[in-house]
Amino acid sequence: MTEKYSELKEQLNLTNELIQVVLGKDTFFKSARELFNKYWKELQKKRPEIVTQEVHHYSGETLAKFWQLDFLLERIKELEFLMESRRQEAILNGDPVQKWIQKDEIIRSENAPAMPNIDDLKAMVNSIKDTSMYEIELYTECFYYVSHRLKKIIDYYPGLKDFKPIGVINVRNNLIEHPDGTHGVTFPSFGCGNQNGPVIKAARTEIERNKSVDQGLYKNALEYKELLELVLCQGLRSLSS
């Protein structure tokens, strides 16, 4: 299964490279980025008096933040795919660590030297070294910090102050940055593998059960993108009127 997975991943990567070369990369935030570019050009044309050096700097940071958010989402999805492939492989072939423990017990019971073969050792090392879950958690938290920073930048621009992505704000404020607040959750936990994406503070104690809930990264990211695009369209209309 590992060999088939490697072939499939290589095929997908090559296909994505071809599409990117021919059409340009169609990332999750591409439409929002293009709308911001359009808004930025109109702002410079229609309201040049407010386009200070600071505003110029923020426009550059905004484009960088779009790239960062797309990178984080893509990396998280790759890692989730990798984890699911390994999970399926473990279901078919058994957990490598548990398999060795069982073999070791049998060998010891026969008074033979307990030495794993090379394939068992490789499987055990790969299993122990797997940091996918930790990486997903790290990149997920990074997504919320970057997206919150982008929201603060967007607030600087005229006509865009109605941008209020509740899902991202809730997770960043109550579950990551200020978990000790009134609506916060301090119990450390993380979950991934469901269709709505990774979840910060997926588990909680009974006393925190009814406090802030993370709806899932992909659901929050979609809300964020749709609200941002809506606000940018409104801002473009206000510049044209």
Image (cartoon, rainbow, N blue to C red):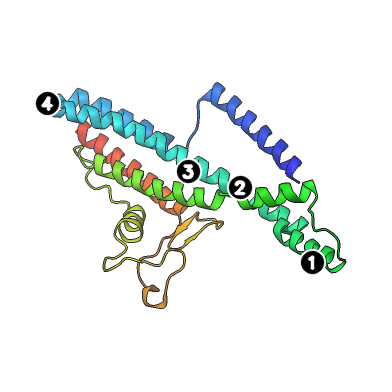
Instruction: Find the distance from the CA under tag 4 to the CA under tag 2.
Output: 49 Å
Q: Earlier in the sequence, mark 3 or mark 2?
A: 3
- Does 156 sit above or below residue 115? above
The residues tagged by marks 3 and 2 sit, at their Cα atoms, a distance apart of 12 Å
SS at badge 2: helix
Front residue of 130 and 69: 130
Front tag of 3 and 4 = 3
Is residue 85 visible from the viewing direction of this image?
Answer: no
- The amino acid pointed to by label 3 is Leu
Tell me where residue 15 appears, x and y as whole percent.
Answer: 63, 30
Characterize the local packing of mark 2: few (<14), some (14-19) or many (20 or more) Cα atoms within 10 angstroms. Answer: some
| Amino acid type, label 1 | Glu
| Marker disc for residue 81 | 2
Q: Is residue 139 visible?
A: yes
| CA separation in Å, label 1 and label 3 | 43 Å
Up the image or down, 196 lies above or below 237; here it is: below
Return the disc, 4 or 2, that comes first in the chain's sequence. 4
Q: Position of residue 72 (x, y in %)?
A: 46, 41
Residue found 67% across the figure and 49% down from its top: 125
Q: Amino acid at mark 4?
A: Glu
Mark 4 vs mark 2: in front? 2
Q: Is residue 92 above or below residue 68?
A: below
Q: Which residue is mark 4?
A: 49
Kindly check if marks 3 and 2 are in contact, taking CB atoms under 8 A apart as contact.
no
Q: Outermost residue toward the bottom? A: 206
User: In the rendered structure, are the residues bearing label 2 and label 1 in contact, judged by CB atoms less than 8 Å apart?
Assistant: no
- Specify the label residue 105 is tagged with: 1
Which residue is found at the position 78% from the left and 47% from the top? Answer: 119
- Residue at point 30% right, 32% down? 61
Q: How many neighbours does mark 4 have within 10 angstroms: few (below 14), some (14-19), or many (20 or more)?
A: few
Type of residue at label 2?
Phe
